[in-house]
């Protein structure tokens, strides 16, 4: 029985230590460490992006319902043309490695693929409405979140903690409450001609959006915001114009233009342009996953506007959904998401500091041969200097002269 008790004792001690550590963290919890100005700014900017998405949804719905205009590629072309006219021009005016010619020489094929991914992500989600219902689109569009987490872990080396997964689940529960409110209100609109194809298009769009957002986060944090927007604007304009001529030439030719249609097209293009321009700023402050979590409220804002513009029925579940998404977003951003490189740097710095402290506390402990040699040289130098000084003063110095801890610490610092 004695060996068994000896084996159980370390386990009990470990559980007690973990419980004590948890209680210490709870006692030390300070709301000011969570509800910071950085979090408030990120949340406000994220909700601003959601309002811009709401603007694109309202203008598109007006074009489709009041003027029978269904031209997603034309609308995307206007956005990419604005990006090209501004940010690509900025790259043209730059010199050195940031000039557009140097960028195209080194990375043109990467931005070509990125432009293709971004254009098709916008096109497939709009095309999905022709085959499946609004409920399916709202639910399956959340597939972008797990794909983003996976790609961030794989490509950006982001390391998520359990609290981040809990926060994502809370946000998805909020989306579920919103979809439930739509079903209760009878807003399960859309076509059911080919639900399987429509759902597949939504999932494809979500995956493409995730790839585009991860590439955007990498480019913004390692290169520049202007380079990303300028290259996406350039290749997006070319790809969307070719695709528009092939797929939508008849629809574009049949548009009955007037000032109202022109105003709606302009409103959509400006909202998309502002959305593309501000997303990199918010991503640089947080992450692509955090931005997409905050933009889950875009459908709610569209529903709130639809109550006044399209006579939608209000449901209390909409407020529940909004609160759940915001709580999940705050929880996700309350704990930082370090990368694998930052963890390695932190561990190496902590190990070096701990070894330095051990060397200071125990001068006789030498961790490697090179450190031993340097310390011996420093000690010998100090002894020789003191022997010379003692010889001048005719004072005897023993061979076992003690070196002060301050001198040894200085030698170790010089070695590091």
Image (spheres, helix red, strand yellow):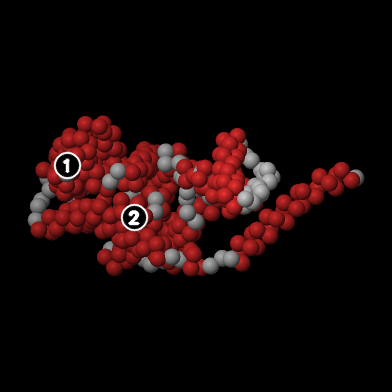
Question: How far from the left and from the top, in percent, is residue 269?
Answer: 19, 52
Is residue 321 at all visible to an observer of this figure? no
Dot in front, 2 or 1: 1
In the image, 71 versus 231, the foreground residue is: 231
Residue at (28%, 55%) from the top-left corner?
A: 278
Above-or-below relation of 327 to 138:
below
**Quarter of the view holding residue 111:** top left
Which labelled disc corresponds to residue 95?
1
Q: Position of residue 299 (x, y in %)?
A: 35, 57
Most foreground residue, 256 or 140? 140
Q: Residue at x 17, y 53 (%)?
A: 265
- In the image, 102: left or right of 126? left
Q: In terms of secondary structure, where does tag 2 sit?
A: helix
What percent of the width, then of the height, locates residue 377?
57, 39
Q: In the rendered view, does 136 fall on the left or right side of 255?
A: right
Name the disc covering residue 282, or none. Answer: 2
The quadrant of the image that shows the N terminus is: top right
- Decide which of tag 2 and tag 1 comes sooner along the chain: 1
Q: Is residue 382 left or right of residue 13?
A: left
């Amino acid at each position: 029985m004695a060996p068994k008790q000896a084996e159980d004792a370390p386990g009990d001690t470990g559980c007690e230590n973990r419980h004590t550590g948890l209680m210490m963290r709870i006692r030390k919890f300070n709301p000011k460490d969570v509800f910071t100005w950085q979090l408030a700014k990120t949340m406000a900017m994220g909700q601003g992006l959601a309002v811009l998405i709401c603007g694109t949804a309202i203008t598109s719905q007006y074009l489709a319902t009041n003027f029978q205009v269904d031209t997603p590629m034309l609308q995307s072309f206007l956005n990419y043309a604005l990006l090209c006219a501004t940010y690509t021009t900025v790259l043209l005016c730059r010199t050195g490695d940031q000039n557009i010619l140097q960028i195209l020489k080194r990375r043109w094929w990467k931005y070509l693929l990125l432009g293709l991914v971004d254009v098709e992500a916008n096109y497939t989600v709009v095309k999905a409405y022709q085959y499946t219902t609004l409920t399916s689109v709202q639910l399956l569009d959340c597939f972008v979140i797990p794909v983003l987490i996976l790609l961030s872990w794989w490509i950006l080396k982001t390391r998520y903690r359990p609290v981040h997964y809990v926060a994502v689940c809370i946000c998805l529960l909020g989306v579920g409450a919103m979809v439930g409110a739509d079903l209760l209100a009878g807003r399960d609109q859309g076509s059911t001609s080919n639900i399987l194809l429509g759902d597949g298009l939504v999932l494809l769009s979500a995956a493409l959006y995730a790839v585009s957002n991860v590439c955007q986060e990498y480019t913004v944090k390692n290169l520049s915001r202007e380079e990303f927007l300028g290259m996406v604007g350039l290749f997006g304009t070319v790809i969307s114009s070719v695709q528009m001529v092939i797929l939508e030439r008849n629809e574009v030719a049949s548009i009955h233009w007037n000032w109202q249609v022109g105003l709606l097209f302009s409103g959509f293009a400006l909202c998309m342009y502002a959305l593309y321009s501000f997303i990199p700023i918010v991503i640089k402050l947080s992450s692509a996953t955090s931005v997409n979590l905050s933009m889950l409220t875009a459908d709610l804002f569209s529903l709130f506007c639809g109550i006044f513009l399209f006579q939608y029925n209000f449901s209390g579940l909409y407020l529940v959904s909004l609160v759940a998404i915001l709580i999940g977003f705050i929880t996700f951003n309350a704990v930082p998401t370090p990368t694998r490189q930052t963890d390695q740097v932190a561990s190496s710095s902590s190990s070096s500091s701990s070894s330095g402290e051990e060397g200071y506390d125990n001068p006789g402990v030498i961790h490697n041969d090179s450190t031993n040699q340097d310390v011996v040289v420093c000690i010998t130098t100090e002894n020789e200097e003191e022997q010379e000084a003692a010889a001048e003063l005719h004072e005897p110095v023993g061979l076992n002269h003690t070196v002060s801890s301050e001198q040894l610490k200085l030698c170790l610092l010089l070695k590091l």
